[in-house]
Image: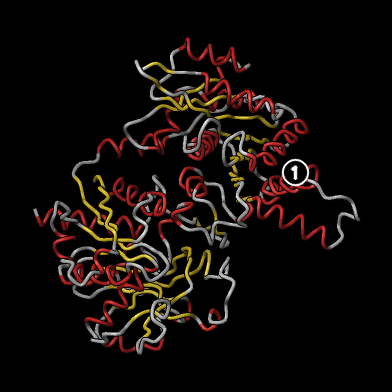
Protein backbone atom coordinates (compact mmCIF):
# COMPACT_ATOMS: atom_id res chain seq x y z
CA UNK A 1 0.00 0.00 0.00
CA UNK A 2 1.15 3.52 -0.78
CA UNK A 3 1.86 5.84 2.10
CA UNK A 4 0.22 9.27 2.32
CA UNK A 5 1.39 12.35 4.21
CA UNK A 6 -1.09 15.22 4.50
CA UNK A 7 0.57 18.58 5.15
CA UNK A 8 -1.71 21.30 6.49
CA UNK A 9 -1.19 24.73 7.98
CA UNK A 10 -2.72 26.81 10.72
CA UNK A 11 -2.81 30.24 12.38
CA UNK A 12 -1.88 32.20 9.25
CA UNK A 13 -0.69 31.82 5.69
CA UNK A 14 2.84 32.26 4.29
CA UNK A 15 4.47 30.17 7.00
CA UNK A 16 6.42 28.15 4.43
CA UNK A 17 4.10 25.15 4.17
CA UNK A 18 5.11 24.52 0.55
CA UNK A 19 8.82 24.64 1.38
CA UNK A 20 8.27 22.39 4.40
CA UNK A 21 6.41 19.82 2.29
CA UNK A 22 9.10 20.02 -0.41
CA UNK A 23 11.86 19.61 2.18
CA UNK A 24 10.10 16.57 3.57
CA UNK A 25 9.99 15.15 0.06
CA UNK A 26 13.72 15.76 -0.36
CA UNK A 27 14.46 13.97 2.92
CA UNK A 28 12.40 10.91 2.03
CA UNK A 29 14.04 10.75 -1.40
CA UNK A 30 17.35 10.87 0.43
CA UNK A 31 16.17 7.76 2.29
CA UNK A 32 15.65 5.95 -1.01
CA UNK A 33 11.87 6.36 -1.30
CA UNK A 34 10.03 7.34 -4.48
CA UNK A 35 8.01 10.43 -3.64
CA UNK A 36 5.21 12.22 -5.47
CA UNK A 37 3.96 15.67 -4.47
CA UNK A 38 0.37 16.91 -4.74
CA UNK A 39 -1.02 20.39 -4.13
CA UNK A 40 -4.69 20.89 -3.21
CA UNK A 41 -5.69 24.50 -3.86
CA UNK A 42 -9.03 25.62 -2.42
CA UNK A 43 -9.74 28.34 -4.98
CA UNK A 44 -12.62 27.94 -7.47
CA UNK A 45 -10.45 28.69 -10.50
CA UNK A 46 -9.91 25.57 -12.59
CA UNK A 47 -6.20 26.37 -12.66
CA UNK A 48 -3.85 29.31 -12.14
CA UNK A 49 -3.58 30.12 -15.84
CA UNK A 50 -5.89 33.14 -15.92
CA UNK A 51 -5.01 34.49 -12.47
CA UNK A 52 -3.17 37.79 -12.15
CA UNK A 53 0.45 37.57 -10.95
CA UNK A 54 -0.50 40.20 -8.37
CA UNK A 55 -3.15 37.84 -7.00
CA UNK A 56 -1.31 34.56 -6.89
CA UNK A 57 2.28 34.95 -8.02
CA UNK A 58 3.72 33.15 -11.02
CA UNK A 59 2.09 30.36 -12.96
CA UNK A 60 4.27 27.25 -12.91
CA UNK A 61 4.00 25.09 -16.05
CA UNK A 62 4.55 21.33 -16.12
CA UNK A 63 5.78 19.20 -19.02
CA UNK A 64 2.24 18.27 -20.02
CA UNK A 65 1.18 21.92 -20.13
CA UNK A 66 -0.67 22.26 -16.83
CA UNK A 67 -0.78 25.83 -15.49
CA UNK A 68 -0.38 25.38 -11.76
CA UNK A 69 0.29 27.04 -8.43
CA UNK A 70 3.86 28.23 -7.78
CA UNK A 71 4.23 25.61 -5.02
CA UNK A 72 4.73 23.02 -7.74
CA UNK A 73 7.85 24.97 -8.61
CA UNK A 74 9.10 24.32 -5.07
CA UNK A 75 8.33 20.64 -5.49
CA UNK A 76 10.34 20.56 -8.73
CA UNK A 77 13.32 22.34 -7.19
CA UNK A 78 13.46 20.18 -4.06
CA UNK A 79 12.42 16.75 -5.38
CA UNK A 80 12.94 14.61 -8.47
CA UNK A 81 9.49 13.03 -8.86
CA UNK A 82 7.64 13.83 -12.12
CA UNK A 83 5.01 16.57 -12.05
CA UNK A 84 1.95 16.79 -14.26
CA UNK A 85 -1.57 18.17 -14.18
CA UNK A 86 -2.45 15.25 -11.88
CA UNK A 87 -0.28 16.83 -9.18
CA UNK A 88 -2.41 19.98 -9.02
CA UNK A 89 -5.94 19.68 -7.64
CA UNK A 90 -8.22 22.71 -7.33
CA UNK A 91 -11.75 23.16 -6.02
CA UNK A 92 -12.68 24.35 -9.51
CA UNK A 93 -11.51 21.10 -11.08
CA UNK A 94 -13.28 19.00 -8.46
CA UNK A 95 -16.64 20.72 -8.71
CA UNK A 96 -16.43 20.89 -12.50
CA UNK A 97 -15.86 17.12 -12.66
CA UNK A 98 -18.69 16.34 -10.25
CA UNK A 99 -21.16 18.63 -12.02
CA UNK A 100 -20.27 17.09 -15.39
CA UNK A 101 -20.90 13.61 -14.00
CA UNK A 102 -24.23 14.75 -12.56
CA UNK A 103 -25.29 16.21 -15.93
CA UNK A 104 -24.34 12.93 -17.61
CA UNK A 105 -26.55 11.03 -15.17
CA UNK A 106 -23.67 9.06 -13.71
CA UNK A 107 -25.00 9.43 -10.16
CA UNK A 108 -28.24 7.68 -11.18
CA UNK A 109 -30.49 10.40 -9.89
CA UNK A 110 -29.04 10.54 -6.39
CA UNK A 111 -28.71 13.86 -4.56
CA UNK A 112 -25.19 15.16 -5.18
CA UNK A 113 -23.53 16.40 -1.99
CA UNK A 114 -20.17 17.56 -0.65
CA UNK A 115 -19.97 14.28 1.26
CA UNK A 116 -19.53 11.81 -0.33
CA UNK A 117 -19.38 13.07 -3.92
CA UNK A 118 -16.98 16.00 -3.63
CA UNK A 119 -14.74 14.25 -1.12
CA UNK A 120 -14.74 11.08 -3.23
CA UNK A 121 -13.62 13.08 -6.25
CA UNK A 122 -10.78 14.59 -4.20
CA UNK A 123 -9.70 11.16 -2.96
CA UNK A 124 -9.86 9.72 -6.47
CA UNK A 125 -7.60 12.49 -7.76
CA UNK A 126 -5.09 11.95 -4.96
CA UNK A 127 -4.95 8.18 -5.49
CA UNK A 128 -4.72 8.68 -9.28
CA UNK A 129 -1.22 10.03 -8.72
CA UNK A 130 -0.15 6.66 -7.33
CA UNK A 131 -1.73 4.84 -10.26
CA UNK A 132 0.33 6.94 -12.69
CA UNK A 133 3.53 5.67 -11.10
CA UNK A 134 3.39 2.06 -9.83
CA UNK A 135 6.86 2.44 -8.28
CA UNK A 136 5.71 5.27 -6.04
CA UNK A 137 6.18 4.82 -2.28
CA UNK A 138 4.90 8.03 -0.67
CA UNK A 139 2.50 10.74 -1.75
CA UNK A 140 2.88 14.06 0.07
CA UNK A 141 -0.35 16.06 -0.18
CA UNK A 142 -0.16 19.76 0.67
CA UNK A 143 -3.55 21.24 1.52
CA UNK A 144 -3.65 24.93 0.65
CA UNK A 145 -4.99 27.61 2.94
CA UNK A 146 -5.21 27.26 6.70
CA UNK A 147 -7.36 25.11 8.96
CA UNK A 148 -10.60 26.97 9.64
CA UNK A 149 -10.90 28.36 6.11
CA UNK A 150 -14.30 27.39 4.73
CA UNK A 151 -12.73 26.69 1.32
CA UNK A 152 -10.36 24.05 2.73
CA UNK A 153 -12.97 22.01 4.60
CA UNK A 154 -13.69 19.48 1.78
CA UNK A 155 -9.97 18.76 1.36
CA UNK A 156 -9.45 18.31 5.10
CA UNK A 157 -12.48 16.04 5.24
CA UNK A 158 -11.08 13.98 2.35
CA UNK A 159 -7.78 13.75 4.25
CA UNK A 160 -9.63 12.62 7.40
CA UNK A 161 -11.40 9.90 5.45
CA UNK A 162 -8.19 8.66 3.84
CA UNK A 163 -6.36 8.55 7.19
CA UNK A 164 -9.24 6.50 8.60
CA UNK A 165 -9.51 4.19 5.57
CA UNK A 166 -5.77 3.62 5.10
CA UNK A 167 -4.86 3.35 8.77
CA UNK A 168 -2.48 5.47 10.84
CA UNK A 169 0.59 3.61 9.62
CA UNK A 170 -0.25 4.34 5.99
CA UNK A 171 -1.56 7.91 6.22
CA UNK A 172 -0.37 10.57 8.65
CA UNK A 173 -0.99 14.25 9.30
CA UNK A 174 1.81 16.83 9.45
CA UNK A 175 0.61 20.22 10.69
CA UNK A 176 2.57 23.46 10.35
CA UNK A 177 1.80 26.22 12.86
CA UNK A 178 3.14 29.54 14.09
CA UNK A 179 4.98 30.18 17.36
CA UNK A 180 4.98 33.99 17.58
CA UNK A 181 7.38 36.06 19.60
CA UNK A 182 5.96 38.81 21.79
CA UNK A 183 7.56 41.55 23.87
CA UNK A 184 10.51 40.36 25.88
CA UNK A 185 11.41 37.70 23.29
CA UNK A 186 8.85 35.33 24.75
CA UNK A 187 7.60 32.55 22.46
CA UNK A 188 3.87 31.86 22.73
CA UNK A 189 2.46 28.39 22.09
CA UNK A 190 -1.24 29.25 22.39
CA UNK A 191 -1.79 29.88 18.62
CA UNK A 192 -0.41 26.40 17.93
CA UNK A 193 -2.70 24.87 20.55
CA UNK A 194 -5.74 26.56 18.98
CA UNK A 195 -4.67 25.47 15.50
CA UNK A 196 -4.37 21.84 16.56
CA UNK A 197 -7.73 22.10 18.32
CA UNK A 198 -9.26 23.25 15.03
CA UNK A 199 -7.72 20.22 13.30
CA UNK A 200 -9.10 17.94 15.99
CA UNK A 201 -12.55 19.44 15.47
CA UNK A 202 -12.19 18.42 11.82
CA UNK A 203 -11.57 14.88 13.04
CA UNK A 204 -7.82 14.90 12.37
CA UNK A 205 -5.27 14.39 15.12
CA UNK A 206 -1.89 15.67 13.83
CA UNK A 207 0.85 13.06 14.09
CA UNK A 208 3.67 15.57 13.66
CA UNK A 209 3.90 19.29 14.36
CA UNK A 210 6.30 21.63 12.59
CA UNK A 211 6.45 24.90 14.48
CA UNK A 212 7.44 28.03 12.58
CA UNK A 213 9.44 30.04 15.11
CA UNK A 214 12.13 32.74 15.23
CA UNK A 215 14.61 30.31 16.82
CA UNK A 216 15.01 26.65 17.76
CA UNK A 217 12.44 25.66 20.37
CA UNK A 218 13.78 24.64 23.75
CA UNK A 219 13.07 21.18 25.10
CA UNK A 220 10.62 22.52 27.70
CA UNK A 221 8.61 24.36 25.05
CA UNK A 222 8.47 21.28 22.85
CA UNK A 223 7.20 19.15 25.73
CA UNK A 224 4.55 21.74 26.57
CA UNK A 225 3.32 21.77 22.97
CA UNK A 226 3.29 17.96 22.87
CA UNK A 227 1.28 17.76 26.10
CA UNK A 228 -1.36 20.29 25.10
CA UNK A 229 -1.63 19.08 21.49
CA UNK A 230 -1.70 15.34 22.19
CA UNK A 231 1.37 14.48 20.11
CA UNK A 232 4.58 12.65 20.99
CA UNK A 233 7.36 14.97 22.27
CA UNK A 234 9.69 13.50 19.63
CA UNK A 235 7.17 14.57 16.96
CA UNK A 236 7.45 18.34 17.62
CA UNK A 237 9.91 20.04 15.26
CA UNK A 238 11.08 23.59 14.64
CA UNK A 239 11.21 25.43 11.33
CA UNK A 240 13.25 28.37 12.52
CA UNK A 241 14.45 31.48 10.73
CA UNK A 242 17.68 30.82 8.85
CA UNK A 243 20.13 33.37 7.52
CA UNK A 244 21.29 31.33 4.53
CA UNK A 245 18.82 29.95 1.99
CA UNK A 246 15.57 27.98 1.96
CA UNK A 247 17.54 25.10 0.45
CA UNK A 248 19.12 24.49 3.85
CA UNK A 249 15.74 23.59 5.35
CA UNK A 250 15.95 19.89 4.40
CA UNK A 251 19.21 19.73 6.35
CA UNK A 252 17.64 21.63 9.27
CA UNK A 253 14.89 18.99 9.44
CA UNK A 254 17.42 16.19 8.91
CA UNK A 255 19.42 17.35 11.94
CA UNK A 256 16.23 17.17 14.00
CA UNK A 257 15.56 13.63 12.70
CA UNK A 258 12.19 14.52 11.15
CA UNK A 259 12.60 11.88 8.44
CA UNK A 260 13.35 9.14 10.98
CA UNK A 261 10.22 9.95 12.99
CA UNK A 262 8.10 9.86 9.82
CA UNK A 263 9.55 6.51 8.76
CA UNK A 264 8.83 5.13 12.22
CA UNK A 265 5.23 6.36 12.22
CA UNK A 266 4.62 4.92 8.75
CA UNK A 267 6.19 1.58 9.62
CA UNK A 268 8.97 1.90 7.06
CA UNK A 269 12.27 0.32 8.01
CA UNK A 270 15.05 2.83 8.57
CA UNK A 271 17.49 3.11 5.72
CA UNK A 272 20.71 5.00 5.06
CA UNK A 273 20.29 8.70 4.27
CA UNK A 274 22.05 10.04 1.19
CA UNK A 275 21.99 13.82 1.23
CA UNK A 276 25.39 14.38 -0.40
CA UNK A 277 23.93 16.64 -3.08
CA UNK A 278 22.35 18.92 -0.46
CA UNK A 279 25.48 19.12 1.68
CA UNK A 280 27.55 19.82 -1.45
CA UNK A 281 25.13 22.57 -2.46
CA UNK A 282 25.48 24.25 0.95
CA UNK A 283 29.29 24.02 0.67
CA UNK A 284 29.02 25.90 -2.62
CA UNK A 285 26.77 28.45 -0.95
CA UNK A 286 29.28 29.19 1.79
CA UNK A 287 32.14 29.31 -0.77
CA UNK A 288 30.48 31.99 -2.92
CA UNK A 289 32.45 35.23 -3.19
CA UNK A 290 31.85 38.47 -5.00
CA UNK A 291 28.55 39.89 -6.18
CA UNK A 292 26.93 40.34 -9.58
CA UNK A 293 23.97 42.68 -9.82
CA UNK A 294 21.24 41.51 -12.16
CA UNK A 295 18.59 44.00 -13.15
CA UNK A 296 15.20 42.36 -13.67
CA UNK A 297 13.15 44.72 -15.82
CA UNK A 298 9.50 43.68 -15.69
CA UNK A 299 5.99 44.81 -14.99
CA UNK A 300 5.03 42.88 -11.83
CA UNK A 301 7.88 44.01 -9.61
CA UNK A 302 5.81 44.74 -6.50
CA UNK A 303 5.19 41.06 -5.75
CA UNK A 304 8.29 38.88 -5.36
CA UNK A 305 6.40 35.69 -6.18
CA UNK A 306 5.39 37.00 -9.62
CA UNK A 307 8.83 35.98 -10.92
CA UNK A 308 9.56 33.29 -8.33
CA UNK A 309 11.17 30.71 -10.62
CA UNK A 310 13.28 33.37 -12.36
CA UNK A 311 14.70 34.61 -9.06
CA UNK A 312 15.38 31.06 -7.89
CA UNK A 313 17.08 30.17 -11.18
CA UNK A 314 19.36 33.19 -10.81
CA UNK A 315 20.29 31.99 -7.33
CA UNK A 316 21.02 28.51 -8.70
CA UNK A 317 23.22 30.06 -11.39
CA UNK A 318 25.09 32.00 -8.72
CA UNK A 319 25.79 28.74 -6.89
CA UNK A 320 27.12 27.21 -10.11
CA UNK A 321 29.32 30.24 -10.81
CA UNK A 322 30.51 30.74 -7.23
CA UNK A 323 29.11 34.26 -6.99
CA UNK A 324 26.28 35.91 -5.08
CA UNK A 325 23.50 37.27 -7.28
CA UNK A 326 21.93 40.52 -6.12
CA UNK A 327 18.50 41.18 -7.60
CA UNK A 328 17.84 44.73 -8.76
CA UNK A 329 14.12 45.02 -9.46
CA UNK A 330 13.29 47.69 -12.04
CA UNK A 331 9.74 48.55 -13.04
CA UNK A 332 9.65 49.02 -16.80
CA UNK A 333 6.66 51.40 -16.75
CA UNK A 334 8.56 54.59 -15.71
CA UNK A 335 11.04 53.88 -18.51
CA UNK A 336 8.25 54.44 -21.05
CA UNK A 337 8.26 58.16 -20.30
CA UNK A 338 9.91 59.93 -23.23
CA UNK A 339 11.80 62.11 -20.74
CA UNK A 340 13.13 59.12 -18.80
CA UNK A 341 16.92 58.80 -18.92
CA UNK A 342 17.40 55.07 -19.53
CA UNK A 343 21.17 55.17 -19.02
CA UNK A 344 20.75 57.00 -15.74
CA UNK A 345 18.01 54.70 -14.45
CA UNK A 346 19.79 51.48 -15.41
CA UNK A 347 23.45 52.43 -15.19
CA UNK A 348 23.70 54.81 -12.27
CA UNK A 349 21.73 55.86 -9.21
CA UNK A 350 23.44 53.07 -7.28
CA UNK A 351 22.28 50.35 -9.67
CA UNK A 352 25.24 49.76 -11.98
CA UNK A 353 23.84 46.41 -13.06
CA UNK A 354 26.12 43.72 -14.46
CA UNK A 355 23.36 42.09 -16.47
CA UNK A 356 19.76 42.67 -17.56
CA UNK A 357 16.99 40.07 -17.61
CA UNK A 358 13.56 40.71 -19.13
CA UNK A 359 11.14 37.93 -18.04
CA UNK A 360 7.80 36.82 -19.45
CA UNK A 361 4.55 38.71 -19.16
CA UNK A 362 1.36 39.76 -20.88
CA UNK A 363 -0.24 43.08 -21.84
CA UNK A 364 1.00 46.38 -23.25
CA UNK A 365 1.93 48.23 -20.05
CA UNK A 366 5.66 48.78 -19.71
CA UNK A 367 6.56 47.28 -23.09
CA UNK A 368 8.27 50.35 -24.54
CA UNK A 369 10.30 50.64 -21.35
CA UNK A 370 11.55 47.11 -21.94
CA UNK A 371 12.41 47.97 -25.55
CA UNK A 372 14.47 50.95 -24.37
CA UNK A 373 16.20 48.68 -21.86
CA UNK A 374 17.11 46.18 -24.59
CA UNK A 375 18.50 48.99 -26.77
CA UNK A 376 20.63 50.26 -23.88
CA UNK A 377 21.99 46.78 -23.11
CA UNK A 378 22.75 46.03 -26.76
CA UNK A 379 24.54 49.31 -27.35
CA UNK A 380 26.44 49.12 -24.06
CA UNK A 381 27.29 45.42 -24.52
CA UNK A 382 25.73 44.60 -21.15
CA UNK A 383 24.85 40.88 -20.79
CA UNK A 384 21.15 40.51 -21.59
CA UNK A 385 18.75 37.61 -21.19
CA UNK A 386 15.25 37.72 -22.65
CA UNK A 387 12.71 35.05 -21.68
CA UNK A 388 9.47 34.58 -23.66
CA UNK A 389 8.23 38.19 -23.80
CA UNK A 390 11.88 39.18 -23.28
CA UNK A 391 12.87 37.52 -26.56
CA UNK A 392 9.99 39.24 -28.33
CA UNK A 393 11.26 42.54 -26.92
CA UNK A 394 14.68 41.84 -28.47
CA UNK A 395 13.03 41.25 -31.86
CA UNK A 396 10.96 44.44 -31.63
CA UNK A 397 14.00 46.51 -30.55
CA UNK A 398 16.10 45.14 -33.42
CA UNK A 399 13.37 45.89 -35.95
CA UNK A 400 12.99 49.47 -34.71
CA UNK A 401 16.64 50.43 -34.24
CA UNK A 402 18.52 48.32 -36.79
CA UNK A 403 15.97 47.89 -39.58
CA UNK A 404 14.49 51.33 -38.76
CA UNK A 405 10.90 50.16 -38.77
CA UNK A 406 9.74 52.73 -36.24
CA UNK A 407 6.28 51.17 -35.90
CA UNK A 408 7.54 47.60 -35.46
CA UNK A 409 5.63 45.89 -32.67
CA UNK A 410 3.79 42.77 -31.60
CA UNK A 411 0.23 42.35 -32.79
CA UNK A 412 -0.58 41.77 -29.12
CA UNK A 413 0.17 45.44 -28.46
CA UNK A 414 -0.55 47.17 -31.80
CA UNK A 415 -2.83 45.45 -34.27
CA UNK A 416 -2.39 48.32 -36.75
CA UNK A 417 1.40 48.04 -36.95
CA UNK A 418 2.75 47.81 -40.51
CA UNK A 419 5.55 45.60 -39.20
CA UNK A 420 4.08 43.08 -36.71
CA UNK A 421 7.38 41.26 -36.17
CA UNK A 422 5.74 39.28 -33.37
CA UNK A 423 2.30 37.88 -34.10
CA UNK A 424 -0.25 35.19 -33.34
CA UNK A 425 0.03 31.72 -34.77
CA UNK A 426 -2.71 31.10 -37.31
CA UNK A 427 -4.36 28.50 -35.08
CA UNK A 428 -4.55 31.06 -32.24
CA UNK A 429 -6.30 33.83 -34.18
CA UNK A 430 -9.83 32.59 -33.47
CA UNK A 431 -9.23 31.75 -29.80
CA UNK A 432 -11.60 33.53 -27.41
CA UNK A 433 -11.37 31.35 -24.29
CA UNK A 434 -7.87 32.06 -22.93
CA UNK A 435 -7.71 29.41 -20.21
CA UNK A 436 -5.22 26.68 -21.16
CA UNK A 437 -5.22 27.63 -24.86
CA UNK A 438 -1.66 28.85 -25.26
CA UNK A 439 1.36 26.94 -26.49
CA UNK A 440 1.99 25.12 -23.25
CA UNK A 441 4.37 22.56 -21.82
CA UNK A 442 7.36 20.57 -23.00
CA UNK A 443 8.54 21.12 -26.56
CA UNK A 444 11.66 20.33 -28.57
CA UNK A 445 14.10 23.04 -29.62
CA UNK A 446 16.90 22.47 -32.15
CA UNK A 447 19.95 24.67 -31.56
CA UNK A 448 22.22 25.95 -34.33
CA UNK A 449 25.98 25.27 -34.22
CA UNK A 450 28.33 28.02 -33.02
CA UNK A 451 25.67 29.79 -30.99
CA UNK A 452 25.56 30.68 -27.32
CA UNK A 453 22.49 28.54 -26.72
CA UNK A 454 24.24 25.53 -28.24
CA UNK A 455 27.33 26.21 -26.11
CA UNK A 456 25.17 26.44 -22.97
CA UNK A 457 23.38 23.13 -23.44
CA UNK A 458 26.20 21.37 -25.26
CA UNK A 459 23.75 19.61 -27.55
CA UNK A 460 21.55 20.29 -30.55
CA UNK A 461 18.25 18.94 -29.16
CA UNK A 462 16.82 20.70 -26.11
CA UNK A 463 13.52 20.13 -24.32
CA UNK A 464 12.07 23.07 -22.40
CA UNK A 465 8.61 24.35 -21.46
CA UNK A 466 6.56 27.05 -23.15
CA UNK A 467 3.75 29.36 -22.08
CA UNK A 468 2.85 31.90 -24.73
CA UNK A 469 0.50 32.70 -27.58
CA UNK A 470 2.58 35.03 -29.76
CA UNK A 471 5.63 34.09 -31.86
CA UNK A 472 8.46 35.60 -33.90
CA UNK A 473 6.74 36.25 -37.25
CA UNK A 474 8.17 34.08 -40.02
CA UNK A 475 7.21 36.80 -42.48
CA UNK A 476 10.22 38.84 -41.32
CA UNK A 477 12.67 35.99 -40.74
CA UNK A 478 14.80 36.59 -43.85
CA UNK A 479 15.07 40.36 -43.35
CA UNK A 480 15.99 39.94 -39.69
CA UNK A 481 18.67 37.39 -40.54
CA UNK A 482 20.04 39.49 -43.41
CA UNK A 483 20.37 42.49 -41.09
CA UNK A 484 22.62 40.51 -38.74
CA UNK A 485 20.31 39.13 -36.04
CA UNK A 486 21.32 35.56 -35.21
CA UNK A 487 18.48 33.04 -35.36
CA UNK A 488 20.02 30.53 -33.00
CA UNK A 489 17.37 27.86 -32.48
CA UNK A 490 14.16 26.61 -34.03
CA UNK A 491 11.39 24.10 -33.54
CA UNK A 492 11.99 20.86 -35.47
CA UNK A 493 11.89 21.48 -39.20
CA UNK A 494 12.78 25.15 -38.70
CA UNK A 495 9.07 25.93 -38.40
CA UNK A 496 9.31 28.56 -35.64
CA UNK A 497 12.15 30.65 -34.22
CA UNK A 498 12.95 29.64 -30.64
CA UNK A 499 16.03 31.75 -29.89
CA UNK A 500 17.66 34.96 -31.13
CA UNK A 501 21.13 36.30 -30.29
CA UNK A 502 22.77 39.65 -30.78
CA UNK A 503 25.89 39.61 -32.97
CA UNK A 504 29.12 41.24 -31.72
CA UNK A 505 27.83 41.15 -28.15
CA UNK A 506 29.30 39.35 -25.11
CA UNK A 507 26.00 37.68 -24.21
CA UNK A 508 22.69 38.80 -25.67
CA UNK A 509 20.29 35.84 -25.83
CA UNK A 510 16.53 35.59 -26.01
CA UNK A 511 14.49 32.38 -25.87
CA UNK A 512 10.80 31.80 -26.44
CA UNK A 513 10.61 29.09 -23.78
CA UNK A 514 10.94 29.28 -19.99
CA UNK A 515 14.21 27.65 -18.83
CA UNK A 516 13.61 28.79 -15.24
CA UNK A 517 11.01 26.06 -14.73
CA UNK A 518 13.60 23.26 -14.87
CA UNK A 519 16.37 24.91 -12.85
CA UNK A 520 17.36 23.32 -9.52
CA UNK A 521 19.78 24.32 -6.75
CA UNK A 522 21.82 21.19 -7.47
CA UNK A 523 21.53 21.56 -11.28
CA UNK A 524 21.31 25.14 -12.51
CA UNK A 525 19.68 25.93 -15.86
CA UNK A 526 22.48 26.06 -18.49
CA UNK A 527 21.26 29.38 -19.90
CA UNK A 528 20.97 31.04 -16.49
CA UNK A 529 24.40 29.69 -15.58
CA UNK A 530 26.04 31.13 -18.70
CA UNK A 531 24.17 34.43 -18.32
CA UNK A 532 25.42 34.90 -14.75
CA UNK A 533 28.92 33.82 -15.84
CA UNK A 534 28.86 36.55 -18.52
CA UNK A 535 27.66 39.10 -15.94
CA UNK A 536 30.50 38.04 -13.65
CA UNK A 537 33.04 38.71 -16.43
CA UNK A 538 31.36 42.05 -17.24
CA UNK A 539 31.56 43.07 -13.58
CA UNK A 540 35.24 42.14 -13.34
CA UNK A 541 36.14 44.01 -16.52
CA UNK A 542 34.27 47.11 -15.41
CA UNK A 543 35.98 47.19 -12.02
Colour scheme of this structure image?
Answer: secondary structure
The residue positioned 43% from the left and 33% from the top of the image is: 249
Q: Secondary structure at mark 1?
A: helix
* Residue at mark 1: 119
The residue positioned 83% from the left and 50% from the top of the image is: 112
Residue 102 horizontal side relative to residue 338, left or right: right
Q: Is residue 407 visible?
A: yes
Nearer-the-camera pick, 62 or 264: 62
342 over 309 or under it: above or below: below
Residue 77: image x %, image y %?
46, 46
The quadrant the N terminus occupies is: top right
The residue positioned 55% from the left and 55% from the top of the image is: 68
Residue 457: image x %, image y %?
37, 62
The residue positioned 25% from the left and 45% from the top of the image is: 324
In the displayed orientation, state which residue is furthest to the left.
Answer: 543
Nearer-the-camera pick, 430 or 208: 430
Total label count?
A: 1
Residue 257 horizontal side relative to residue 368, left or right: right
Mark 1 neighbour density, 10 Å: few (under 14) some (14–19) many (20 or more): many
Residue 518: image x %, image y %?
45, 55
Residue 338 horizontal side relative to residue 467, left or right: left
304 over 27 or under it: above or below: below
In the rendered image, which quarter is residue 364 located in?
bottom left
Q: Is residue 267 visible?
A: no
Amino acid sequence: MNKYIFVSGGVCSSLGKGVAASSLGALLEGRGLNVRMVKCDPYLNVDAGTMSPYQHGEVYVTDDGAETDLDLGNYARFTTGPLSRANSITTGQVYDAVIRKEREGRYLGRTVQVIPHITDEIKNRITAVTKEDPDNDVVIVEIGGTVGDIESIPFLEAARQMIHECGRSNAISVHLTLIPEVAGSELKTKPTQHSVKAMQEMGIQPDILICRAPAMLEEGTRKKIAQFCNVDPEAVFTSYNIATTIYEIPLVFFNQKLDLVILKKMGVESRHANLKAWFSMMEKFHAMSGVVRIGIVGKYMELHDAYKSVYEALFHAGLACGVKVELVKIDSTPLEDAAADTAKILGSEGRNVDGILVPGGFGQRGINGMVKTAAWARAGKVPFFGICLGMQIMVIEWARNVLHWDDADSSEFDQDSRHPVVSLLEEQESVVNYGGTMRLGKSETVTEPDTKIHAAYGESRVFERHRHRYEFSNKYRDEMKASGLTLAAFTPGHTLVECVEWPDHPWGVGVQFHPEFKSKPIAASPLFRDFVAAAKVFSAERS
